[in-house]
Amino acid sequence: MAEHNSIMDTLETVLVPVHRDGHKFVGLAALLTLFFFWLWAPLGWLLAIVTLWVVYFFRDPERVTQTRDGLVIAPADGRITAVEEVLPPKELDLGDEPLVRVSTFLSIFDVHIQRAPIAGEIEEIVYTPGLFLNAVLDKASEDNERNGVVIADANGNKIGVVQIAGLIARRILCFANQGDAIGVGERYGLIRFGSRVDVYLPKGKTALVSVGQKAIAGETVFADLKSDEGPREARSQ
C-alpha cells in the first residue's frame, strides 16, 4: 500500500493540471501536430514537442500558502532580480515616498499564474498600455504594458502588485475585479510568456528575500508586516 501511495504521489507531481486559459492553446497545438504528422512525420514530431511545451507553460500546480496575518507571500514564480526602494507607480496611488519594491522575473519556463500576496479587498485595478521591453530592465516597470492591483488588508496595510509584460509577452490577464475580497495565495492573474511581477511593500517595511533567490508563488514569504526585522543578508554558494 505504501508503495502504491508513493507511485501515485510521484504521478501527481508530474501530471500538473493545465490552467483553463491554456486549454485552447493546447488544443490548437494538438490539432496542428496531427495535421503535420499527416503532412510529414518529422514536422509532426517537432509540433509534438511544441505541444508538450505549451502544456508545461500553462501548468497550474497546487501550492501550500502560509495564512498567518501579516505575511506577504510571493505572487509569482521566478528569479528575484531587484529589491530596492523606489517611487511607486502614480496610477496605484500609494503615495509619493519611496517604497521597497521586490521584482520577480518570469522566464518562459516558470509557472505564469499570479497569486494574491495578502488577504484583503482589491481597492484598485489599473491597466496601463505601454512597450514590450525586456522585463529584466529597470525601466520596464515604467515603460512596459502593465496591470496594477492594490490590495488592502484588514489592518489597513496596502500592497501594490504589478503584472508587467515582457519582450515576448503580449497578454496580461486579471481574473479579479475591483471590490473583490481575495484570500492570500488565491489565483488572480496570468501573463502569457516571459514577464515580470513587482510587489510594493508598505512604507517602512523591508523584504525578507534577496536578489538571485528563486520565488515560488503562494509559498515564498516576501515580508512580515508584523515584524521590525531589517533586510536580511544573503550570499550565493
Image: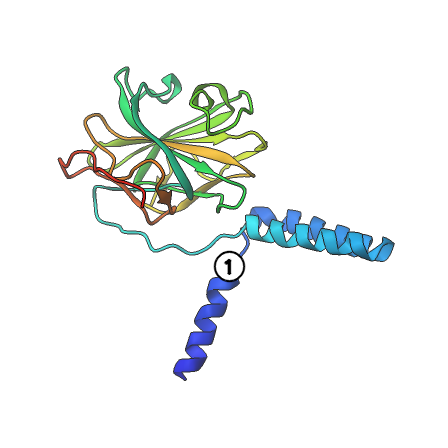
Q: For the point 46% across and 25% down, which residue is it?
A: 137
User: How many numbered discs sit on the rendered protein?
Assistant: 1
Q: Residue furthest top?
A: 96
Q: Residue furthest front?
A: 237
**Residue 24, x across and y down, in percent:** 65, 48
Position of the N terminus by quadrant: bottom left
Q: Quadrant of residue 178?
A: top left
26 horizontally vs 77: left or right: right
Q: Is residue 65 above or below residue 84?
A: below
Out of 172 and 105, give the one closest to the viewer.
Answer: 105
Q: Is residue 45 above or below residue 154?
A: below
Amino acid on which disc 1 is placed: Val
Q: For the point 72% across and 51% down, which residue is it?
A: 47
**Residue 92, x across and y down, in percent:** 36, 22
**Residue 197, x across and y down, in percent:** 42, 34
**Residue 12, x across and y down, in percent:** 47, 66
Q: Residue furthest left?
A: 228
Report helix, strand or loop for mark 1: loop
Q: Is residue 131 above or below residue 72?
A: above
Q: Is residue 46 above or below residue 230?
A: below
| Colouring rule applied to residues | rainbow
47 horizontally vs 20: left or right: right
Q: For the point 37% across and 20% down, which residue is it?
A: 89
Q: Which residue is mark 1?
A: 16
Q: For the point 42% across and 77% down, which residue is it?
A: 5
